[in-house]
Image (spheres, rainbow, N blue to C red):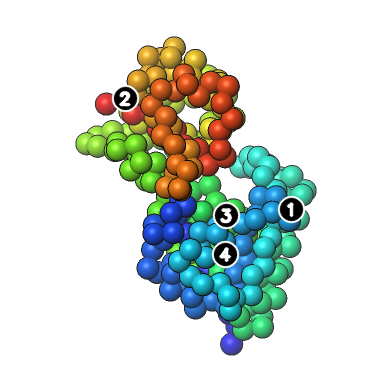
Amino acid sequence: MKGTFHIVGVGPGDPELITLKAMRVLRDCPVWLTPAAQKDGNSTALSIASGSVDPQDKTILIHHFPMKKIHMGESPDPEVQRAWDDAARLINEQLEAGNDVALPTLGDPAIYCTGFYVYETLLQQNPDASIKVIPGISAIGATAAAANTPICLGDDRVAVIPAIFESEKIKEILQQFESVVFMKVYKAMDRMVPLLEELNLLDKAVLVERTSMENQRVHHDLKSTLGMELHYFSTLVVRKS
């Protein structure tokens, strides 16, 4: 009997924010393929998963996924494509051997997640592969909780975008939506702060670094972040109401 591949959302960082279902799936899967941003680096997702489920008896495959931009409708960087192809091959070998495989992923798999690229690549290699997706608590929800603010209420319209968009596009979105969540802001704040000030939205914005982790920081004074080296796990919420 062939195994099943599970893409498991393990939440934003706090091991207590992992769901009961995610814990059960991680316990039941003998193989974990865990993503690492750097070659020979640690896996944050593995660290989070290990805080809830003992990995001692698991086969742990740490796999490097390059942190390079992906533009929808365009071919990915060859190094990125190789990483997806290699991950899919590793997973498929385990599935063919009858082993269930879990890919623990930060936050929720449906939001800017490498897991779905692996999902598509695996199906290209093995169209009959059994795949299940386990949702998780997103960094978006955890950021709002850390800042004690809602993302949206009533008839608010919400946009979720990466801060790598060009400034004019960001301005347009901020003008069109009542609430905007910016992901990947760690290198963009020196550009975002003047832009928000121009639109009179500085006092409507809050930035959270390392959401839900032990060294979490909440920034209400965004001007204080100018020139600051922010952590990769940083999320900005702008809510006009």
Name the quadrant of the C terminus. top left
Name the quadrant of the N terminus. bottom right
Q: Nearer the viewer, mark 1 or mark 2?
A: 1
> Between 129 and 133, which is closer to the camera in this rendering?
133
> Disc 4 designates what residue?
103
Query: In the image, what residue occupies the spot 72% across and 60% down?
Result: 85
Query: In the image, what residue occupies the spot 62% across and 84% down?
Result: 98
Q: Position of residue 161 (x, y in %)?
A: 49, 35
**How far apart are the two marked residues, 1 and 4, measured between alpha carbons?**
17 Å
**Mark 4 or mark 1, which is nearer the start of the sequence?**
1
Q: Is residue 119 left or right of residue 89?
A: left
**Mark 4 or mark 2, which is nearer the start of the sequence?**
4
106 vs 209: above or below: below
**How far apart are the two marked residues, 2 and 4, measured between alpha carbons?**
37 Å
Q: Position of residue 152 (x, y in %)?
A: 29, 37
**Mark 3 or mark 2, which is nearer the start of the sequence?**
3
Secondary structure at numbered mark 3 = helix
**How far apart are the two marked residues, 1 and 2, measured between alpha carbons?**
41 Å
Q: Nearer the viewer, mark 1 or mark 4?
A: 1
**Mark 4 or mark 3, which is nearer the start of the sequence?**
3
> Disc 3 designates what residue?
44
Mark 2 is on which residue type?
A: Lys
> Disc 2 designates what residue?
240
3 vs 107: above or below: below
**How far apart are the two marked residues, 2 and 3, measured between alpha carbons?**
33 Å
